[in-house]
Image (spheres, helix red, strand yellow):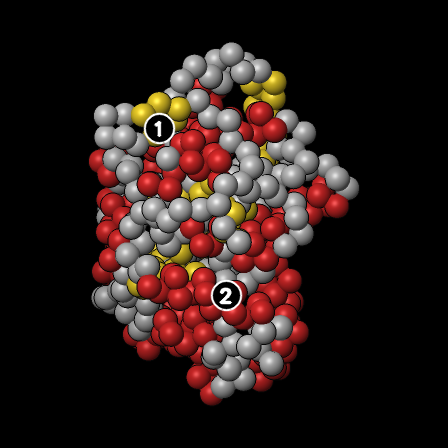
Amino acid sequence: MKRYGLMVLLLLVVLTVASCGNRTATTETDSGSAGEMSETTDSEGTTEESGDTSAETGEVEVFSWWTGGGEAAGLEAMIELFAEEYPDITFNNAAVAGGAGTNARAVLATRLQAGDPPDSWQGHAGQELIGTYVAANQIQPLNDMYEANGWMEVMPETLIPLISQDGNIYSVPVNIHRANVMWTNPTLLAEANVDVPTSWDEFFTACEAIEAMDKVCLAMGEQWTAMHLLETVLLGSLGVERYNGLWTGETDWASAEVTTALESFAQVLDHVNSDASALSWQDAAQLVVNGDAAFNIMGDWVNGYFASSPDSGGLGLTPNDAYGWAASPGTAGTFQFLSDSFVLPVDAPHPDGATAWLNVAGSKAGQEAFNPVKGSICARTDCDAALFDAYLQSAMDDWSSNEVVGSLTHGVVANDSWKSEIDTALGLFLTDRNVESFQSALAAACASIGACQ
Ligand code: GAL
């Protein structure tokens, strides 16, 4: 196994061992750069961010892809808190529209190449961060900031290795999202007289009843949502160990098990809406709550979209009433996760503004403002559970009890180069549905990245 595989194996071992997602990290780390926080020590001896920040001036440009229903509202809640804490720092919201950052990340790459970084940007914990931005020396370690804020005491031990290299910590995680969620329309399922499927075989049986009612079985959107579906089918079909092995070279992409998983994926695609490529993730999710489709497999930002208020671009729905949820087929007991985090670029034009933003993003108040609206749970382990709705409380329980694995589409298990090769192969497959050539292309992608030889 080559270096890439070894690095990912190390991360996956940490993920699996630390399957209790909300244990805190207390490991000592080397001291890095950055971080000028005013701090206090409370009666229990933990440092916590505070102090008079109102004298700080200047500006900060924060880059993300949170412009849509639910996502923009979450960001806005954190920006409001930022404005209260740093009233004299002008906040420039540089969000670029497009789910999963498909457009935003292309814009970011162009800006970075031109030497024009924003002051901070959204980057996923895992290989997207380490194998892309750290590998290219584009971001700075934040160890001092972690120490000043006591973040090692409150960030989960699962996450720290995914944002670290050589003892340096490179980002501030703001949340934990779950990828392997199947959203359901309970009324439609009752009318079709089907239970929520727990395996792909049950799913195919359910589809027969739903399609007999002239409804779509599984709502899907543009191509990145197909990759999201693919990773959940791989996990459900291969199981945790072999799924993890895909990213370390331990599972052979050319094996019969992967053929079976890809055949299931092809079969699942036979049950999606014909206009998928024209729909955003919000459009696809909406088909479920409108009663046009029974299921949608998508991350729990869908909960943010469904539950947040119409004033802020959400649908204002109540979980467990207008919609239900379950682990995607074959993945009960597994939490396929991703984490949004923010970074400090090497050449941030306004490093003080960036530090102020990161202080808010890592704070309890910041995460409690952001996550209940965004549809995610806090990365921090000390948020008040009462602030979160029924879905998010169930996600908190699962995060702390399930086996944790990483997402492909959202940056945990593969770096950008590998993901991009998988995406190219997927694009062809969505057109030709040729399992054999898809599998060969996936095996070749793993080999070309150096993870499988
Ligand atoms: C993910 C991101 C989430 C959400 C989603 C849909 O990549 O981590 O926070 O924004 O895309 O846009």
Closer to us: 101 or 5: 5
Q: Secondary structure at mark 1?
A: strand
Q: Residues within 10 Å of mark 2 (few under 14, many from 20)?
A: many
239 horizontally vs 440: left or right: left
Task: Tell me what residue is drawn at x 62 percent, y 50 percent.
Answer: 133
Closer to us: 453 or 291: 453
Q: Please identify the quadrant where the N terminus is shown.
A: bottom right
Q: Is residue 310 visible?
A: no
- Residue that protrudes farthest toward the top in the picture: 55
Residue 217, x across and y down, in percent: 39, 65
Q: Secondary structure at mark 2?
A: helix
Residue type at the position of mark 1: Glu
- Label placed on residue 48: 1
Q: Residues within 10 Å of mark 1 (few under 14, many from 20)?
A: some
Residue type at the position of mark 2: Val
Q: Quadrant of residue 49?
A: top left
* Lower position in the chain sequence, tag 2 or tag 1: 2
Task: Tell me what residue is drawn at x 24 percent, y 57 percent.
Answer: 401
- Label placed on residue 8: 2
Q: Quadrant of residue 264?
A: bottom left
81 horizontally vs 19: left or right: right
Up-down relation of residue 196 to residue 161 (above or below): below
46 horizontally vs 413: left or right: left
